[in-house]
Image (cartoon, rainbow, N blue to C red):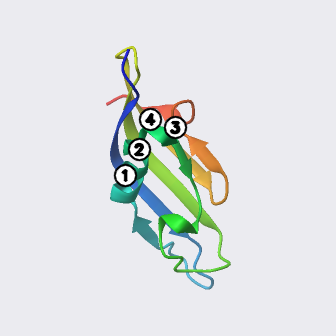
């Protein structure tokens, strides 16, 4: 049996901008891919401002990811996961399976 393998298609971190009807976002795809490439992380991503230099201290933030996962038994799936800022997210057993 092998290890979990991940291909991050897109990962964003967005935040509220007081007084604005738009919601700025930061592309964190490469950063998250780097986190998931480290076997010690086991599919767990810490959702906090350390993913980016915090552009809006004190504002609520949201994370979203589309990622393909290959499990140790060779099963492949693609998932969409999202969460608010603060907790960790384990993409091995979170989110919604995507069908293209």
Q: Secondary structure at mark 2?
A: loop
The x and y percentages for residue 69 are 39, 31
Local packing at callout 1 (Cα closer than 10 Å; few below 14, some 14-19, many 20+) is few
Could you tell me which residue is drawn at 60 percent across and 51 percent down?
83
Q: Whole-percent x and y of residue 77? A: 39, 26
What SS does tag 3 mark? loop
SS state under label 1 = helix
On-image quarter of the C terminus: top left
Does the residue at mark 4 contact the one at mark 3 (Cβ under 8 Å)?
yes
Residue that protrudes farthest toward the bottom in the picture: 19
- For marks 1 and 3, give the CA distance: 14 Å
In the shown orientation, is residue 18 left or right of residue 3?
A: right
Identity of the residue drawn at 59% across and 74% down: 16
Disc 4 to disc 1, C-alpha distance: 18 Å
Marks 4, 1: nearer the viewer: 1
Do the residues bearing badges 2 and 4 touch, measured as CB atoms within 8 Å? no
Q: Which residue is mark 2?
A: 38
Mark positioned earlier in the residue sequence (4 or 3): 4
Residue 95: image tag: none
- Nearest to the eye among marks 1 and 3: give it: 1
Mark on residue 91? 3
Q: Which residue is under mark 1?
A: 34
């Amino acid at each position: 049996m092998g290890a979990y393998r991940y291909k991050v298609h897109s990962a964003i971190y967005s935040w509220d901008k007081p007084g604005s009807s738009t919601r700025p976002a930061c592309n964190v795809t490469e950063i998250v891919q780097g986190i998931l490439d480290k076997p010690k992380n086991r599919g767990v991503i810490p959702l906090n401002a350390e993913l980016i230099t915090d552009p809006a201290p004190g504002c609520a933030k949201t994370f979203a990811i589309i990622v393909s996962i290959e499990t140790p038994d060779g099963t492949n799936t693609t998932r969409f996961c999202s969460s608010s800022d603060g907790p960790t997210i384990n993409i091995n057993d979170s989110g919604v399976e995507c069908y293209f």
